[in-house]
Image (spheres, helix red, strand yellow):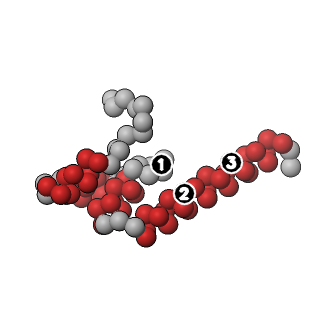
């Protein structure tokens, strides 16, 4: 293997490990709403489904759930919404 392919392999492996840890943490801890928020705000390239987004939006009608949704960082730090 060349030097570039080793770097790519290491990067891919690191990314896989990070996603696995995040998924395991999400499955173990948190309420159903927190799990949905974690799934919707994950770093996956396809984003959240319409159904998931609708469920999160509907949960904001409850006062306590609204606070949970608002406390979640929906955009990465430094991102300006379009």
Mark 3 and mark 1: span between their CA atoms?
15 Å
Q: Is residue 41 above or below residue 21?
A: above
Q: At which x and y percent is residue 58?
A: 18, 56
Q: Are marks 3 and 2 in contact (CB under 8 Å)?
A: no
Mark 1 and mark 2: span between their CA atoms?
9 Å
Q: Residue at x 14, y 55 (%)?
A: 63
Which labelled disc corresponds to residue 25? Answer: none
Closer to the camera in the image, 40 or 78: 78
Q: Earlier in the sequence, mark 1 or mark 2?
A: 2
Q: Earlier in the sequence, mark 3 or mark 1?
A: 3
Q: At which x and y percent is residue 16?
A: 61, 57
In this picture, residue 32 sits left or right of residue 39: left
Q: At which x and y percent is residue 17?
A: 61, 58
The residue indicated by pointer 3 is 11
Mark 3 and mark 2: span between their CA atoms?
12 Å
Is residue 54 shown to the viewer in this render? no
Which labelled disc corresponds to residue 19? Answer: 2
Q: Is residue 16 above or below residue 71?
A: below
- Res. 62 image quadrant: bottom left
Q: Residue furthest right?
A: 1
Q: Residue at x 28, y 62 (%)?
A: 33
Q: Are marks 3 and 1 in contact (CB under 8 Å)?
A: no
Q: Are marks 1 and 2 in contact (CB under 8 Å)?
A: yes
Which labelled disc corresponds to residue 43? Answer: 1
For label 2, the SS is helix
In this picture, residue 70 sits left or right of residue 17: left
At label 1, counting other C-alpha atoms closer than 10 Å, the crowd grade (few under 14, some 14-19, many 20 or more) is: few
């Amino acid at each position: 293997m060349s030097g570039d392919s080793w770097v790519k392999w290491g990067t891919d492996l690191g990314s896989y490990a990070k996603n696995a840890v995040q998924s395991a943490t999400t499955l173990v801890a948190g309420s159903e709403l927190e799990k949905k928020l974690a799934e919707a705000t994950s770093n996956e390239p396809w984003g959240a489904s319409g159904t998931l987004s609708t469920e999160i939006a509907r949960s904001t009608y409850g006062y306590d759930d609204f606070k949970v949704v608002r406390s979640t960082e929906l955009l990465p730090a430094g991102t300006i919404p379009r």
